[in-house]
């Protein structure tokens, strides 16, 4: 799902929360909104790592090429994992949830990131791309270590 759709969905989520909980602090609404699409910073970081270019346009181009390659692979029955996105892992989001016990702002970041991840999950299921994402950091690390040995 493109960041613009996550941003739009984040605005809708924040508006609904504000309607049903009007006493919520604006800072918390901003944190939810920001987390709902800024979680994709890990996509940008991967694109920089792969291409060695900092341009946001270049990052979008990188992922468009990856998308087209993925379509061809799926048609041939190849189902490989995509790039690893740390902020999208259950462990990272759980960490934010736990940190929410120490500072409530982390809880609202957690809410925005979980919302983002649910939208990604729905989108990937709908498009038949669920195999592309590694949801667990420790699975990714274990597989990476196994490949190196």
Image (cartoon, rainbow, N blue to C red):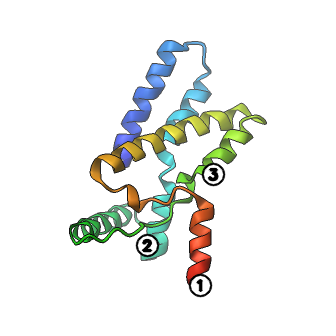
Q: Residue at x 78, y 36 (%)?
A: 102
Q: Nearer the viewer, residue 74 or 85?
A: 74
Q: Is residue 65 left or right of residue 16?
A: left
- Residue 129 vs 11, above or below: the answer is below
Residue 72, percent from left and from top: 22, 70
2 or 1: mark nearer the eye = 1
Please give the residue where the numbered disc 1 appears in the rendered image: 148
Quadrant including the C terminus: bottom right
Residue 143: name its quadrant.
bottom right
Q: Residue at x 65, y 45 (%)?
A: 94
Q: Residue furthest right?
A: 102
Q: Are marks 1 and 3 in contact (CB under 8 Å)?
A: no
1 or 3: mark nearer the eye = 1
Please give the residue where the numbered disc 3 appears in the rendered image: 92
Residue 90, percent from left and from top: 58, 50
Residue 146: name its quadrant.
bottom right
Q: Residue at x 67, y 39 (%)?
A: 97
> Closer to the N terminus: mark 2 or mark 3?
2
- Residue 96 vs 53, above or below: the answer is above
2 or 3: mark nearer the eye = 3
Residue 1, percent from left and from top: 35, 49
Q: Residue at x 38, y 70 (%)?
A: 80
Please give the residue where the numbered disc 2 appears in the rendered image: 53
């Amino acid at each position: 799902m493109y960041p613009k759709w996550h941003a739009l969905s984040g605005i809708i989520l924040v508006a609904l929360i504000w309607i049903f909980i009007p006493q919520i602090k604006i800072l918390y609404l901003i944190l939810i909104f920001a987390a709902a699409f800024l979680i994709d910073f890990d996509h940008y970081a991967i694109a920089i790592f792969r291409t060695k270019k900092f341009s946001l346009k270049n990052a979008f181009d990188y992922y468009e090429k990856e998308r087209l390659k993925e379509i061809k692979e799926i048609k041939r029955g190849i189902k490989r994992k995509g790039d690893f996105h740390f902020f999208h892992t259950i462990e990272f989001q759980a960490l934010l949830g736990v940190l929410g016990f120490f500072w409530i702002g982390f809880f609202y970041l957690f809410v925005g990131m979980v919302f983002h991840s649910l939208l990604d999950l729905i989108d990937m299921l709908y498009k038949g791309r669920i195999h592309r994402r590694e949801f667990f950091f420790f699975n990714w690390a274990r597989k990476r270590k196994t490949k190196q040995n």
